[in-house]
């Protein structure tokens, strides 16, 4: 690779970048990882807000590639909190001596493919340039935070943060007047935690989300022994299920059972830990509106039972989308928070926020003073982190422009016109239980790179007809799903981002086994879908 600084440049040292680095070393690649944070961990580095934790069972979330690592690490809770996950990822970085190839506090500004060298030139924010044969993006799915577009935000005299830019030192909320804007999965986790200590908490809710109990608890010693003895079965299970969780769709249709059986099943799911109620529910929950109404009515009854003030309960019950059609926030006492005297809900559909003032927040009902404003307002998801880098492929074509009408990829990993660029967790890859998808993506990418290495190939590009076939498949998987009839980050809508107001199929909605079958067929067929030179 004469003339190029590295064999591969990886953008990002989160879960995907770290694992990719391990695999590239096995290929003997000279690799440089550029990471914006001052440490490893990606999502788990940035999202330090109070209450941040897994919604996947801890033991199904860690890396599975090394049996010794699995035995060396003990998760303390069924759904581990963020500080523990960050410790875990630091443990991984130490164990495999990864930091020597990672340059921290380094943000990539631009990346450009040069045909003359068949390589990528990566420009950092400090202006320095670095070249490599391959560019591997490990930039995450939910890593480009978005603030709301509210006038006067910069004028606020108190402290304010986006949840994904939380300060490293702990924040003491005792006695403070706190506002939280946003009630997605992040807002829910934050609200239920901050409500414990805040002097007064006001929640600004634009759209209520359906939430269900997490049922977290510590892992006992006996459970720890059982978990460590059964890792092969746990990961085999994750490989077989629809979205790599330990839960999977119930084969029964909602109306194939009696009303009593249905209620009993819902009760059982509501009382069980984790995502079972979302991804282990009746098979037609997200395709049949009547089936969806059944579970929505059930959860609405639960909310009414848990929130004492009936009018407030109604405000917390979604009316514009059915249960599970957006990402389900899991909660621990979230609804009970609204029974506390120090918590108030402001429905911004009834009393819109007009502006942020130096003292606090002005709504149509008047001004309220705050010491802290928390923006739990989400992310420019999936393509946002790509859009924030000026990525140009062959003939100088901008990725952002190529994806202006919605992303088009091959298997979520390759883009037509962007040779030698591989994406981990790119648009239209299988998501679900994310680390399981990461490990699959990295292993697939590594096999392709080994194939190129063994044959001294220096150019990899996907054929347009392969992109079209994959794109058609992605669209067909989304057909008939209620999820795609609702605004959310999964349908590419973010009202705080220019050009992201219309729904697209932003997420691959097929099963993980189906996704892997497509990818495995490409490998087995000798990469006929790619132009290799
Ligand atoms: P989400 O799920 O996108 O939630 C963002 C929340 O912020 C949501 O309730 C939004 O309301 C709200 N929002 C955004 N802008 C505004 C303004 N201007 N005013 C009021 N409220 C606003 O992001 P999360 O961080 O909670 O979760 C992202 C993923 O991270 C999650 O799915 C997990 O996978 C982990 P809206 O619904 O748009 O009306």
Image (cartoon, grey):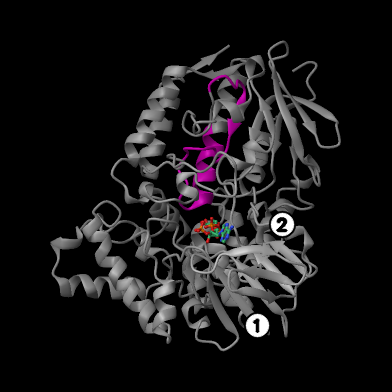
Image height of 326 relative to 506, above or below = below
- The one nearer the camera, 423 or 310, is 310
Image height of 122 relative to 484, above or below = above
Percent across and percent down for residue 13 are: 69, 46
- Asked if residue 330 lies in the magenta stretch, the reply is no
Image quarter hosting the C terminus: top right
Percent across and percent down for residue 206 are: 51, 63
Residue at 56% over, 76% down: 192
- The one nearer the camera, 355 or 293, is 355
Residue at 64% over, 51% down: 146
Image quarter hosting the N terminus: top right
Residue at 71% over, 75% down: 370
Residue 95 left/right relative to 411: right
Query: Can you name the residue that lies furthest to the bottom here?
Result: 341
From the image, tell me which residue sits under label 2: 90
Percent across and percent down for residue 254 are: 20, 61
Residue 54 appears in view: no
Percent across and percent down for residue 58 are: 53, 64
User: Looking at the image, in which quadrant does ligand 1 appear?
Assistant: bottom right
Q: Which residues are magenta?
A: 416-444
Residue 115 left/right relative to 271: right
Residue at 57% over, 89% down: 341
Residue 410 marker: none
Residue 303 appears in view: yes
Disc nearer the start of the sequence (2/1): 2
Badge 1 marks a residue whose secondary structure is strand
- The one nearer the camera, 91 or 225, is 91
Mark 2 is surrounded, within 10 Å at the Cα level, by few (under 14), some (14 to 19) or many (20 or more) other residues, namely some
From the image, tell me which residue sits under label 1: 200
Badge 2 marks a residue whose secondary structure is helix
């Amino acid at each position: 690779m004469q003339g190029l600084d590295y064999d591969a440049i990886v953008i990002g040292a989160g879960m995907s970048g770290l694992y990719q680095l391990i695999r590239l070393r096995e290929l003997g690649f000279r690799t440089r990882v550029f990471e914006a944070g001052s440490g490893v961990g990606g999502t788990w580095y940035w999202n330090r807000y109070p209450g941040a934790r897994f919604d996947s069972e801890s033991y199904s979330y860690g890396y599975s590639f090394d049996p010794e690592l699995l035995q060396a690490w003990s998760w303390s809770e069924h759904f581990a909190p963020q500080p523990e996950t960050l410790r875990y990822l630091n443990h991984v970085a130490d164990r495999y001596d990864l930091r020597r190839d990672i340059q921290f506090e380094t943000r990539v500004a631009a990346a450009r493919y040069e045909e003359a060298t068949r390589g990528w030139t990566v420009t950092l924010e400090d202006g320095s340039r670095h070249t490599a044969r391959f560019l591997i993006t490990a930039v995450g799915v939910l890593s480009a935070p978005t603030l709301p577009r509210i006038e006067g935000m910069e004028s606020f005299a108190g402290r304010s943060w986006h949840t994904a830019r939380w300060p490293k030192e702990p924040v003491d909320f005792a006695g403070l007047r706190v506002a939280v804007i946003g009630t997605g999965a992040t807002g829910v986790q934050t609200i239920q935690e901050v409500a414990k200590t805040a002097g007064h908490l006001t929640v600004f809710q634009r759209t209520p989300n359906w939430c269900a109990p997490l049922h977290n608890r510590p892992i006992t010693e006996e459970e720890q022994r059982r978990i460590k003895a059964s890792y092969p079965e746990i990961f085999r299970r994750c490989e077989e299920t629809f979205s790599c969780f330990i839960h999977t769709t119930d084969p029964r249709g909602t109306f194939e059972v009696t009303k009593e059986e249905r209620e009993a099943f819902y009760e059982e799911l509501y009382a069980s830990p984790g995502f079972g109620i979302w991804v282990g529910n009746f098979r037609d929950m997200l395709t049949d509106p009547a089936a969806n109404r059944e579970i929505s009515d059930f959860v609405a009854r639960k909310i009414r039972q848990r929130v004492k003030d009936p009018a407030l309960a109604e405000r917390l019950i979604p009316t514009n989308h059915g249960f599970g059609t957006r990402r389900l926030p899991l909660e621990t006492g979230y609804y009970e928070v609204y029974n506390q005297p120090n918590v108030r809900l402001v429905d911004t559909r009834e009393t819109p926020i007009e502006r942020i003032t130096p003292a606090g927040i002005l709504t149509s009902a008047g001004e309220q003073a705050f010491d802290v404003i928390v923006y739990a307002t989400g992310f420019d998801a999936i393509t946002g982190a790509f859009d924030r880098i000026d990525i140009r492929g062959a003939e100088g074509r901008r990725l952002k422009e190529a994806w202006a009408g919605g992303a088009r990829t091959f298997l979520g990993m390759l883009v037509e016109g962007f040779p030698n660029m591989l994406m981990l967790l790119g648009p239209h890859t299988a998501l679900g239980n994310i680390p399981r998808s990461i490990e699959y993506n990295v292993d697939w990418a590594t096999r392709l790179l080994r194939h190129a290495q063994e044959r001294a190939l220096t150019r990899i590009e996907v054929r347009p007809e392969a992109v079209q076939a994959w794109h058609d498949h992605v669209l067909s998987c989304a057909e008939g799903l209620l999820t795609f009839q609702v605004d959310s980050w999964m349908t590419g809508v973010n009202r705080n981002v220019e050009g992201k107001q219309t729904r697209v199929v932003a997420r691959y909605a097929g099963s993980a086994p189906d996704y892997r079958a497509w990818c495995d067929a490409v490998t087995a067929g000798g990469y006929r879908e790619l132009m290799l030179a």
